[in-house]
Image (cartoon, helix red, strand yellow):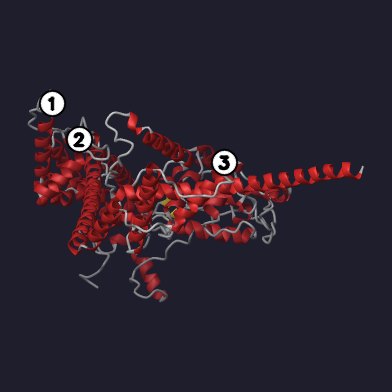
Amino acid sequence: MPGSSPFKTPGRPPLAFLGGLGLGAAGLRKVGAAGSTPGRIPGSVTPRPPPPPGAPAMTPAGTWQAAARKAPMNVAGRQMKQLQWDKLSPNAVASTVWGRNALDESEWSKKFKSEGIFDAMEDDFRMKQIVKRIVVNDAAKLKSVLTDDQRKHIQIALLKPGGVNKGGTAEDVGTSIKALVGRILALDDTLSETYLSALKTGLPGPEEVGKLNVYKEAPENELFELDSADRFLVECLRIYRVNERVKSMLYRCQFEDTIGSLEQDASKIYAAARSLLDAPHFEELLQLVLMLGNFMNATGHKGGAFGFKVTSINKLVDTKSATTSSKTLLHFTAATVTKMMPSTEAFLDELSKAADAYKADIGHVRAKVADLRASQKALDLELENYVEVPDLDPRDQFPKKMFRFAKVARERLDALGDLFTLAEKAVNDALAFYGEDNKSIPTTQEFFGIFKTFVTSYKKARDENMQTAARMAKSAEQAARKAEALAAAAASGPSDSLVDEAMRKLKEGTFVDSPRIARRDRRRNQSNAPTVVPARPSSPTEVEDMDIRQNAHALLEALRGEGFNGSSTPSTPPLPSASATSSRRSRTREGRRVGDSRPGSPNPGESAVPPVPTLRMVSTAVEEEAHEDGHEQEQEQELEQELELELELEQEQEQEQERDDATPNQS
């Protein structure tokens, strides 16, 4: 229509543009008369017929353009192997040897066909008919360009975890491998860091790539001849920039855990350093240690100090007490804080963050941040290669997912860099605040480890002080209870009255003779003089000695009858042996017999005044007598046995004498 024709251009008639398409006014009228094209323009001409097969195509400007693919003149009846050549672009052959048309292909094609050249070629280079149901686990029938170690690594670390069954058919293995490669293309999140690391190391090197590239364009039937590891690598090589892609995928997989750990460490370091800069109770403790240290070092070279490095606080445990090695200067400091400055123990809370951060190392954070930035830079450069990729696999999700991830990762890296800068500055400030520097203490592990060690040692010393105090309190309580019991016993009076009464009777000698003593004396006299009738001693010394023993024994028996317990008496020395006691008793008696010869001894006719026995003396005497009695009983038994033997011998001698006397009478 006039004024609205889409073919109208400025400066040219509306139909002039159609001339470029080879259509004139007459041609348009002829087309309109045929009525075969709706919307045709009257006066147009009939277009030229299409070119024959294999001929160049015509451009809109009327020129001929080379076809994208040459039409084949002869086609094999069976599937043929492929010649792996590199095709030239149709537009680039005009200036090359291929643009001269030196050979008439049509004529020569007829000759080759008539001579059977194509048939012979088809027989020699046809595709082998491979049965697809062949089990591919027969390694002897499969080709491979890889070493045994490479194949094992790929099959164990990549194919088996990826769901590829080595014992399946060739068709099944090929399907499984393609599915696995599809997961790599789609950036499947189920591909773990371990798998991607194994994939990175399992990709072929330049030598293997050169050998495997011949199979990149090979048909499926030819891939059936390859080992499953080789087929997997062939499929991987078809992925666009597969090596760089796997590195980027591994960086993406590791990023979250790595940056999360670094953020946590940087936050711990920053918080710990800031807490050390604001710890008033810990400053009080350091002032106390300074005061105690100056008191100890007052006369030495290290005395009169205005301060000390914070590393010195862990040397308090090296100074031992003079009374006991289990007590150190740290125990004394903790006891002083508990007694004099209890509020200062709040420093344990102030040092808790530093003690918890002793495993975090700012040097490690610095190195890992640098690694992440290098990986991020490599990812950004790699993504530039995906801006314009015309023949990218439709399943490939790498550009879509990686562009989005790169933006988020870049933002988090920038935030981590800022946090790291703050943490580093805080650590340097804390080092300087406590008299140190990053040369004497190069790592935060060593710096925060000082406070971790001190907190642990201080708590241990404080607990040991509490245990010692508890033991002392318990001992004091027991002593107090004993004192109260003694005081109560003294107030009641029965025990003292009983002892006093027993001592009075012992002095007066009013105790009744014990039958046991009489029996003992009788046995003793019988052992010394078997033919003499036993009698009680009559000498004053023996009577005095026997009376003392008799009275002591009776006193102890009376005390025990009244409920007296020997455990309440003072401890006595160990009892002497029977022989020693007998010897001592003999010496004592001899001494008494010759006592008149010693200066100051009483006259023989005068009775010596015995010393007033104490309760301890009584108890000791009775114990000695009991020991003597036991020993004497043993001696008496031996003596009785000897007497019986002597009696038997005497009887035998009498009988022999009687027989001797009877013999002469008979004669």
Depicted 194 relative to depicted 312: above or below: below
Q: Residue at x 56, y 61 (%)?
A: 175
Does dot 1 land on a helix, a strand or a loop? loop
User: Which numbered disc, 2 or 3, marks the residue closer to the eye?
Assistant: 2
Q: Quadrant of residue 302?
A: top left
Q: Which residue is mark 3?
A: 211
Give the residue type that dot 2 points to. Thr
User: Along the line of sight, which residue is nearer the eye, 481 or 154?
Assistant: 481
Q: Is residue 544 visible?
A: yes
Q: Is residue 632 above or below residue 184?
A: above
Look at mark 1 in the image and give the residue it sits on: 302
Kind of element beneath mark 2: helix
Q: Which quadrant is the C terminus positioned in?
A: top right
3D distance between C-alphas at marks 2 and 1: 16 Å
Tell which tag, 2 or 1, sits nearer the viewer. Answer: 1
Give the residue number, with chain letter if any, for mark 2: 311
Residue at 25 percent across and 69 percent down: it is 5
How far from the left and from the top, in percent, is residue 653? Answer: 76, 43
SS label for mark 3: helix
Q: Earlier in the sequence, mark 2 or mark 1?
A: 1
Residues 221 and 234: in front is: 234
Dot 3: within a 10 Å radius of its alpha carbon, few (fewer than 14), some, or many (20 or more) residues?
some
Question: Do the numbered discs 2 and 3 sit on residues whose CB atoms are within 8 Å?
Answer: no
Identify the amino acid type marked 3.
Answer: Lys
* The furthest residue to the right: 667
- Residue 333: which quarter of the image? top left
